[in-house]
Amino acid sequence: MSRPALELADIFRQHGPAYRARHRLPIGHLRVMRAIETCRTAALGGHVERCDQCSHQRIAYNSCRNRHCPKCQTLAKQRWLERRKDELLPIPYFHVVFTIPPAIAAIALQNKKIVFQILFRTSAQTLLTIAADPRHLGASIGFFSILHTWGQNLLFHPHVHCVVTGGGLPPDGECWIAGRPRFLLSVRVLSRLFRRLFLEALERAFAKAQLQFHGALEQLRDRDAFQQHLEPARQTKWVVYAKPPFGGPAHVIEYLGRYTHRVAVSNQRLLALDHEQVTFQYKDYRSHDPQRSRQMSLPAEEFLRRFLLHVIPSGFQRIRHYGLYSNRYRAENLTRCRLLLVGARSELLPSHAQIQEIRTTIVETAARCPQCKMGWMRRVLTIPAMRWKPTRPIRAPNTS
């Protein structure tokens, strides 16, 4: 794939220093900026390769491997998808999206870790509870949950995408209960339970003093003001969107490949950097033609501000597994499901031999000399990485 004419790294390198000079940023944001700016440059080191036939040389610089960098997600995505291929069942899968309203999103922006945890926990509890109810499905389901925090315009819009099995196991585990072909669970019922569970969890977090409020939200430190802020959210319908089911495991893999390791804006969406303005493509899903691509131009400083809204707390897991896919009992549950389901898994998904053959082809293509097409590129020299100074000055201990 050819290198895009404009990359996110170009914008950060050109406008990042001025942005850091004007704003006091959290250490996590500074690390993300540095990673994107130095990715695949001499600053991170690398190596020199030489062809063993024609002596053609090339330099390969190291990647930053930061999960917010659009250039570093392809390999991580492929490794994750390869593990998931063995876990998909020969059944339909459904796509459900849970979104929190803007008033709650404002709180989430200042309390990312705790509110994101609540979002994961309550959305999962909602799906598991309604699916287990005999009035709906009466079965234990399995699903992946993937956190996204952005809309197409890069504003803060936290939501989770759930890829849900189109059926599940009853309490006795003696059969497979399949959902209806075009309908799994009632969106109206999901929405109401999700709203109640989320607000209850948020109020418990407030009561335990786990939430922080700054700037425009500082008045929410008062309990009465906090309750008043939540009142509109109690009265409105929360968005739980159920998309049409996937055609099968192959379609699930295609979907997961697009969504799991996505960042707020890809290099392919960037169009221009002119006169301190960044222009990028986006889609307006609220318009009458949601699939039509549009263009938006923002001052570079505003573009960087919006991108940094989506930095995930360090160590936070943004892909999680629940129900039949929960880590502890996954192997046992999937073995049981396959015994009950009809259909050969090998016919639906690539075999291990096919995956290994594809991997070998990719490796050999990368190692073959691009000049003579005959020799192999061999590493002949290692380039050390730069030694970085501390991001913030370290104060000397007080010896007085």
Image (cartoon, grey):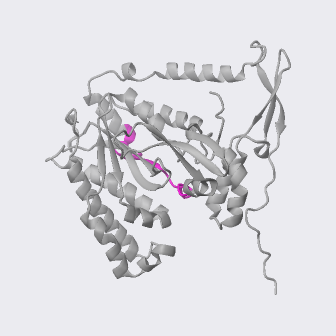
* Residue for point 81% across, 53% down: 387
* Residue for point 21% across, 36% down: 179
Q: Residue furthest bottom?
A: 400
Q: Is residue 215 left or right of residue 241?
A: right
Residue 197 magenta: no
Query: Does 3 appear above or below 295?
Result: above
Residue 214 visible in the current orientation = no
Q: Main secondary structure of the magenta part?
A: loop
Q: Where is residue 205 drawn, in percent x and y?
A: 39, 71
Q: Where is residue 276 drawn, in percent x and y?
A: 66, 52
Residue 53 visible in the current orientation = yes
Quadrant holding the N terminus:
top right
Q: Which residues are magenta?
A: 309-331
* Residue for point 42% across, 36% down: 292
Q: Where is residue 246 drawn, in percent x and y?
A: 33, 32
* Residue for point 31% across, 30% down: 338
Q: Where is residue 162 drawn, in percent x and y?
A: 36, 44
Q: Is residue 54 left or right of residue 97?
A: right
Q: Nearer the viewer, residue 369 or 91?
A: 369
